[in-house]
Image (tube, coloured by chain):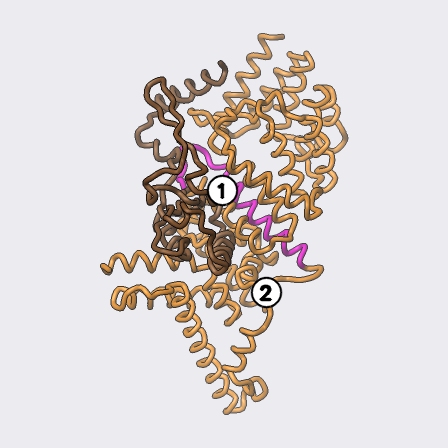
Chain colours: A orange, B brown
Amino acid sequence: MQPQDAHRTVETVFRIEQARLIAALARMVRDVGLAEELAQEALAIALTEWPRSGVPANPAAWLMATAKRRAIDLLRRRALQDRKHAEIGLDLDDAQEDPVALIEHRLDDDVGDELLALIFTACHPILTPEARAALTLRLIGGLTTDEIARAFLQSEPTIAQRIVRAKKTLAQSGLAYEVPRGAKRRTRLASVLEVLYLIFNEGYAATAGEDLIRPALCAEAQRLGRILSGLMPDEAEVFGLLALMEIQASRLAARTGPDGMAIPITEQNRSRWDRLLIGRGLAALARAESLGGADGSYALQAAIAACHARAPRAADTDWRRIAELYDRLVAVQPSPVVGLGRAVAHSMAFGPEAGLALLDAPGLAERLDGFAPLAAARGDFMLRAGRAAEAKLQFERAATLTRNAGERAFLLSRAAAAGEGG
Amino acid sequence: MRVIVMVKATEDSEAGVMPSNELVEAMGRYNEDLIKAGIMLSGEGLKASSHGKRIAFDGPSRTVIDGPFAETRELVAGFWMWEVKDMAEAVEWVRRCPNPMPGPSEIEIRPVIEMSDFAEVMTPETTELHERNRANLENR
């Protein structure tokens, strides 16, 4: 084998194994930053050894064994230092434990799946969602700091600092490195799912012509969702979120026109929807529902997305079912944006007046004041209700509120059309 | 990127020889690894080509040919669809696969054509033409 082939093999194997290596090491040394450094050391050793001695028969196991040996060396050195401190009378009690026995005890300790523990640690709620996302992409996704920076339209030093701070916060917090159980599990899992959906949405918000790393975030979030569903096969909301991401991603190729302008779901060319992803999404949704999670917030959003996915043509959409799902969604997630979606669904199921009534219900309009989609929806309902002159004003208002040039052009064209119609 | 990973047929698979318990178990573990790595999208095993049909095209004519088919090593006995970062990752995962057949066998990896593969030859104008053609076809 040529040395450069060996190099490439090392890099590929490391990329595949990185998250598991860091997870196993973090469990030993209880510090994700240190674990990452140890994994990098194992990579450096492989890069010198493999081109010389050939790629080992089981390269993944080789990397793991090498990395663990480094970790044990480190813990031994630390214990030795502690003992020296103890000998000069600093810390007598803590130095009594035999370092090797301590390590073995940690390895036998049942903390569940190591990778899962790493995911829960990187997504710990003591970190901001942005820090969680960066750390998750770094440690589990294996993205470089530069890639994460480009993906989130941030400078590299900003992201580097965010990651360093997050690791420090985790190291200082004295967290148990484990998969949370019992009552804590629910809130901790919600924190993990929030991060995955944040990563997905960042990719979904990417527009044509941007760095390709941005839309690639969708694929990365889906991969993380698939990993999580493989590790937690009985968690309904994991499957709810996976279903939502798979179905939304199925429309990635159809959601913008050649000019980069967004195409509404009812106008999209459905032959361009990815049937494989739809199939996977529907299967994941069925799993979420069979696990008793039909009323989870992600599962309900996935069920709404599934209504569109199941309709061969836009005219076949079951809007009554979507309206009913929104009624349930607004109960578990009473946000104004969900309220707006609910109003649109009701307008499609029961007529524009029903939609207008929901927009005018107390609370919604005040909280969404200045939100372009609210004015656009109101304009749409009014136009369909035969109130063209009022509709024109709403479209114009929406056009002044949006920051997206393509959207503004679209809204102004609707305003002009409403003006001609009235 | 998406890849199709094809397990090529052998005389055993064409004869309908069922895999041993050990192989079924090893494959089960391997599939579990693929799922936990988040790369497996789908996968199926195929019946021997004696259950298959071929349709030969020549201008307007269509001729149906019954299996089995002769060129055993070129036939497909099963496949996966994976989502991987690049071909090197796919190759590394295939290396880890247990030998799917009792004797010597082959697995072939083929990348799926994606929109970005066209990006270099497509100008905005040709993309639009392509889109219009597609839309017209569907409205018919």
Task: Give the residue number, with chain letter if any, for mark 1.
Answer: A218
Q: Earlier in the sequence, mark 1 or mark 2?
A: 2
Q: Quadrant of residue A390?
A: top right
- x and y percent of residue A263 in the render? 52, 25
* Dominant secondary structure of the residues highlighted in magenta in the image: helix
Q: Residues within 10 Å of mark 2 (few under 14, many from 20)?
A: few
Tell me what residue is drawn at x 47 percent, y 45 percent: B45
The label on residue A142 is none
Q: Quadrant of the C terminus of chain A?
A: top right
**Residue placed furthest toward the left:** A2
Q: Quadrant of residue A316?
A: top right
The label on residue A112 is 2
Q: Using the numbered discs, state the Cα–Cα distance from disc 1 to disc 2 in whole angstroms.
A: 28 Å
- x and y percent of residue A191 in the render? 61, 52
| A4 sits to left or right of A175 | left
Which amino acid is tagged 1? Cys
- Depth order, front residue of A168/A250: A250
Q: Is residue B139 magenta?
A: no
Q: Quadrant of the N terminus of chain A?
A: bottom left
Magenta segment boundaries in residue numbering:
A185-212
- Depth order, front residue of B36/A411: B36
Residue B135 to residue A420: above or below: below
Which amino acid is tagged 2? Gly
